[in-house]
Image (tube, rainbow, N blue to C red):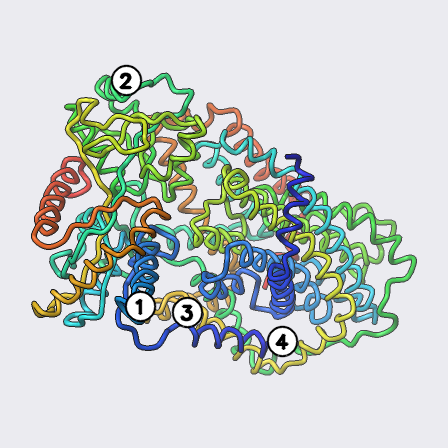
Amino acid sequence: MSTFEFLLQGMLVACQPMNLLYALIGVTLGTAVGVLPGIGPALTVALLLPVTYKLDPAGSLIMFAGIYYGGMYGGSTTSILLNTPGESASIVTALEGNKMARAGRGGPALATAAIGSFVAGLIATLLLAFIAPSIVKLALVFGPREYFALMVLAFVTVSSAFGDSTLRGLTSLFIGFALAIIGIDQQTGQARMSFGVPDLLDGIEVTTLAVAMFAIGETLYIAAQGSRAPDKVEAVKGSLWMNAQDWARSWKPWLRGTFIGFPIGAMPAGGAEIGTFLSYATEKRLTKHPEEFGNGAIEGVAGPEAANNASAAGTLVPLLTLGLPTTATAAIMLAGFQQYGLQPGPLLFATNPQLVWGLIASLLIANFMLLVLNLPMIGLWVRLLTIPRPWLYAGILLFATLGTIGANPSVFELGMLLAFGLLGFIMRIFGYPIAPVVVGLILGPLAEQQLRRALAISQGDPTALVMSPVAAVLLAVAAAALIIPLILRARGRGQVLAQLAASED
Amino acid sequence: MKHFILGSILAAAIALPASAADYTIIAPANPGGGWDQTARSLQTVMQDEGISSSVQVQNVPGAGGTIGLAQFASQSAGNPNALIVGGYVMVGAILTNKSPVSLADVTPIARLTGEYEAIVVPASSPIQTMGDLVEALKKDPGAVSWAGGSAGGTDHIAVGLIAKAAGVDPTKINYVAYSGGGEALAAILGSQVTAGISGYGEFESQVKAGTLRLLAVTSAERLEGIDAPTLKEAGLDVVVENWRMIAAAPGLTDEQKAAVTADIEKLAKSAGWQEMLKTKGWQDTYLSGPAFQEQLAKDISATQGILKDIGLVQ
């Protein structure tokens, strides 16, 4: 059967009324949590995970994918209107988008974000459908040493993306590594750093750490600021729609953003944020209106918004073909697959084609649903943000605690949630980025296990790590990714990255 | 919208704990795994066959089942309605994790199902028979890498026993642990390792597709419908069965224990359970009473021995 036939068959699966309903619930929830700062798609999927194991795999995974896409859509709204990025991938959007909103051009900014996300989501999902199966064929070439090289690449891209203070980024990453060591070591079966506490034998739960660091830490931070925190919603003034000039200036950034975001999302080390940085930098360099950058240039909204949605689809490529989670949401979706005894990876397309193609097809449908949901409802989303802060954050606290207890009814787990929440709060106060901690906890053990497997297979010979062409190329790319930002920074072009890192929420 | 989200989460949270149950079965693993599936199958059949009007399954995952076991032993003592699913993996995990709670702290009732291990190589491998593999192992144990499940688990124990039976030092085996069956399978299919070992079910479709070569199974007799010799036929005196059992709480009276045993026997003999075994592809290895106790004691001491030989337990 050709890819096209598989996709049509997938459409049939996705178009079953129940699956359409799950997709609708997913995109609605996703947009809502994307709009609300502090709650992201990862948390939402984590909270829903225990609730869904009675549902059939196709339905719940379709819903999760809808949440994922929806979150990428919704994140832009708070960035633009409140200068408070709902998601880390929307940080760049705030730079130009909020300036546009202050100038009374919030309508066109939201519109170019929504349509750009749609265009990017559409193209990237089609790329996922047609390119992912061929990547599957390459996936079996990946052994422990190739995976280890991939992990090295991931660490380099993540830590070099944290702007002017690589030291702070690396500090956060190593906190994540330290936490990752806790628990039973897979290769020897021995407990490490568990100090005789049975609850620690299985290590730190990624979702507990992520929820604590982001939701609890953010809440404490906002509470600590008290009434000093700025809290002013910009009304949408003027036309809600884009004029001819807006369209003319938007379509190229949409396409460029898509083709930057997709491969970076598909790169197991990419993630959505880096794509948005690169897209912003590209648009800034290519624009015919350089004077508008920094004062509300529509290209600076259109490009990064397209890039973050394209990378959302890109992320599904390594998840589905290699079983490799590259974002927190993907990591939780992986847990979702495993909950049904499905192992994403080289064989998923062969063993569960109906599920995979149903998922891909429903992404296309979710994308249409999102456009329909977002364009007319821009006005309504704005009103959601008028919820008073105490109510909003009390709700977030309740939500986070309930989610953690629901996933693991244990007092110890709740204690860890609060302790990591405090850690997140302290890190925020001292300006350390939060995301690398979670990345370290997810990727640290993967890198360690792959390295030790590779060395076990080569019987301790470290040169085996670079003897495979794939691994050698990946390590070379990692070296380049480490050196190029240093050169750029030396030439004074790292200011964008530095500025971004400073405003990371 | 926020109210809707909170409302739905609250509703879901309230809906999770069910009302009073005749039996509560602890599945000491995450949803989806073998123990969880066993517990949920028991739940279905016990309710359908009228053995119990209400059965609830609770997942307490972690550390090879020892976290669930510890919680069960301390919280359910004397409760005749509490059950826990367990198995051979637990025997090894108790030893390697130095678990303060062991199977002696609960009341094992009966063995229910089991699965045998299979040893495979990629179809492109020069190794044709189990004899070839043993030959390679004798020549250089470190050069033969084995992909299987977590360290100290059934797969690892089986490799240790094979090495020992072949006269190779079990501490020299090159065992590469993977977390999931699929992950190990990808490594074997990609010829990243010399051989792979796991439950036969993990490899079945690949063996049938001809991408993996099945060298041997770890049963005492040849298995129906599986075209492979036993390890005994290959000259290795090794039998490994990855069995699953059901246990009751500690501190039960003899009457309570007899009542639970009778319910489980009724279940094991029921048409519904036999049907379930067929659907899931599980072997019926029902064994209860003194015979089960004896086999359990034998397994525990043998496991202790081989884990010491491999070097995972001091």
Q: Is residue A257 above or below residue B56?
A: above
Q: Amino acid at mark 1?
A: Val
Mark 3 closeness class: few <14, some 14–19, many ≥20 residues within 10 Å: many
Q: Are marks 2 and 3 in contact (CB under 8 Å)?
A: no
Q: Is residue B308 above or below residue B26?
A: above
Q: Position of residue A343 (x, y in %)?
A: 46, 45
Q: Are marks 1 and 4 in contact (CB under 8 Å)?
A: no
Q: CA distance from mark 2 to mark 4?
A: 65 Å
Q: Position of residue B1 (x, y in %)?
A: 62, 76
Farthest front residue in view: B271
Instruction: Specify whether disc 1 shares its chain with disc 4.
Output: yes
Q: Amino acid at mark 3?
A: Gly
Q: CA distance from mark 2 to mark 3?
A: 51 Å
Is label 1 in a helix, a strand or a loop?
Answer: strand
Q: Position of residue A473 (x, y in %)?
A: 55, 29
Q: CA distance from mark 4 to mark 3?
A: 21 Å
Closest to the observer, A451 or A230: A451
